[in-house]
Structure formats: C-alpha cells, structure tokens
C-alpha cells in the first residue's frame, strides 16, 4: 500500500470517529439517493413537467448520459481502483459491498454535474441551493460509508462539474440543437 493511499485511509478513519447510529442511518439514506441517479431522475421528471425548467431537465439528461459513459463505463473500468474497505481487515460496511472500481466516485460526479446545472439555471435560491447541499451530502456519505477514497470523491466532483460546464457550453453555443437531438426541437 502506497503512502498516498495510507494518508487517504487515515482521513477515512478520522471520519469514522463521527460514526453513531443516527449518522449511520442518515448517511446510508443520503447515499442511496444517488444510487442509479434516483434523486436526479426524480428532478428530471419533475422539471420536464414544467415550462420553466424543461430546458434544465434536458441539460441534465445530456449530463446524465455523459456521466454514464465517461465515469461508469470508461474511467471506472480503466482505473479499476480497489475500494477502501477492501484494504482494511474486518471493516463493517453499512451497505452491501460494491462490484465496480472506486475511482472516480460516480455518486459524486452525477451529483456535481446535476447540482451545477440546476445552480446555474435555477431561478430561486431554494432551487439553486437544495441540489447543491444534497450533492455535498451525497459526496460526504461516500466517505462516511468507507466506499470511496477522498481522491475518488474530489475527482468525481471535478469531473461532474466539468461535464456540466461542457454541457451548458454546448447548449448556449447552440451545438446541442445541431446534434439533432430530438428532445431539443
């Protein structure tokens, strides 16, 4: 085990000092909101039903697909990093063991990209800040649950932000319409 990995495990161990039954349940539930993008799919469905946020929902769909391809299908499989709990003997997980690689955090990437789009496109403080707060909590929950290293979560947040920035750039430059995506007509 390398020096950097040891350092990251110490950070995760420090977070474990916060563990208690209330936070255990809360973090499991917060993290589960990010499973298969369930909370963000909920946002998409609600937003597609409104005139005011239909474009935002469409941008989130594009970012969702980009995250799926870049993070889940490409980077995770190429890097295939071992998860932290696999390096620690007898660690008691609060969730079932995961089968994919640790780097980057898909939960964090999806959360950052969607929260960034909603923050930029949102019309009220509540709509801007609720998803942002949720994204931060989801990212932290992955550390609390010991399923990601801090660098996995930070990288996921950065990748998600970059995906959202690129998606919005394509939209504002009119390039998404040029791709002839039927839902942009």
Image: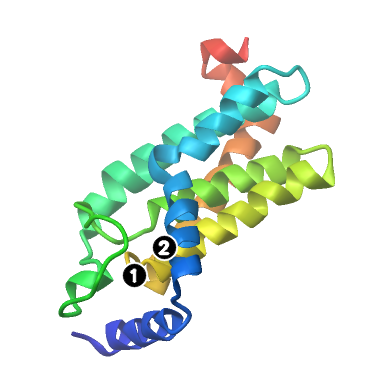
Q: Tell me the quarter of the picture where residue 1 sits.
A: bottom left
Q: Identify the residue at horizontal 24%, vertical 55% (top origin).
A: 96
Q: Residue furthest right?
A: 124
Counting from the top left corner in percent of width and height, residue 32 is at 42, 48
Q: Is residue 175 visible?
A: no
Q: Identify the residue at horizontal 72%, vertical 46% (top origin).
A: 119
Report whether 103 appears left or right of 19. Answer: left
Q: Identify the residue at horizontal 24%, vertical 66% (top origin).
A: 83
Q: Could you tell me how many numbered marks the image carries?
A: 2
Q: Give the image's coloring scheme.
A: rainbow
Q: Is residue 94 visible?
A: yes
* Residue picked out by circle 2: 142
Q: Tell me the quarter of the picture where residue 126 sits.
A: top right
Q: Is residue 81 above or below residue 168?
A: below
* Residue picked out by circle 1: 146
Q: Is residue 132 above or below residue 9?
A: above
Disc 2 is placed on an element classified as helix
Disc 1 is placed on an element classified as loop
Please say if the residues under marks 2 and 1 sit with CB atoms less than 8 Å apart.
no
Q: Identify the residue at horizontal 60%, vertical 18% (top origin).
A: 177
Q: CA distance from mark 2 to mark 1?
A: 6 Å
Counting from the top left corner in percent of width and height, residue 25 is at 45, 60
> If the image is split into quadrants, where does the C terminus sit?
top right
Counting from the top left corner in percent of width and height, residue 133 is at 65, 56
Report whether 113 appears left or right of 29. Answer: right
Q: Which mark is residue 11?
A: none
Given residues 125 and 3, the one toward you in this image is 125
Report whether 185 appears left or right of 160. Answer: right
Query: Tag 1: Cα neighbours inside 10 Å, few (<14), some, or many (≥20)?
Result: many
């Amino acid at each position: 085990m390398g020096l950097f990995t040891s350092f990251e495990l110490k950070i995760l161990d420090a977070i474990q000092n916060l563990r208690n039954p209330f936070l255990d349940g809360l973090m499991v539930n917060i993290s589960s909101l990010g499973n298969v993008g369930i909370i963000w799919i909920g946002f998409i469905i609600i937003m597609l039903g409104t005139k005011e946020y239909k474009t935002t929902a469409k941008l989130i769909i594009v970012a969702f697909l980009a995250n799926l391809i870049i993070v889940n299908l490409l980077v995770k499989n190429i890097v295939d990093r071992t998860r932290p709990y696999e390096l620690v003997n007898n660690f008691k997980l609060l969730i079932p063991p995961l089968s994919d690689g640790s780097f980057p955090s898909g939960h964090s990437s999806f959360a950052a990209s969607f929260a960034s789009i909603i923050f930029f496109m949102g019309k009220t403080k509540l709509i801007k800040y609720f998803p942002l707060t949720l994204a931060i909590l989801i990212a932290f929950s992955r550390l609390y649950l010991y399923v990601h290293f801090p660098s996995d979560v930070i990288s996921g947040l950065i990748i998600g932000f970059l995906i959202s920035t690129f998606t919005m750039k394509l939209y504002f430059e009119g390039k998404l319409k040029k791709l002839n995506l039927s839902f942009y007509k």
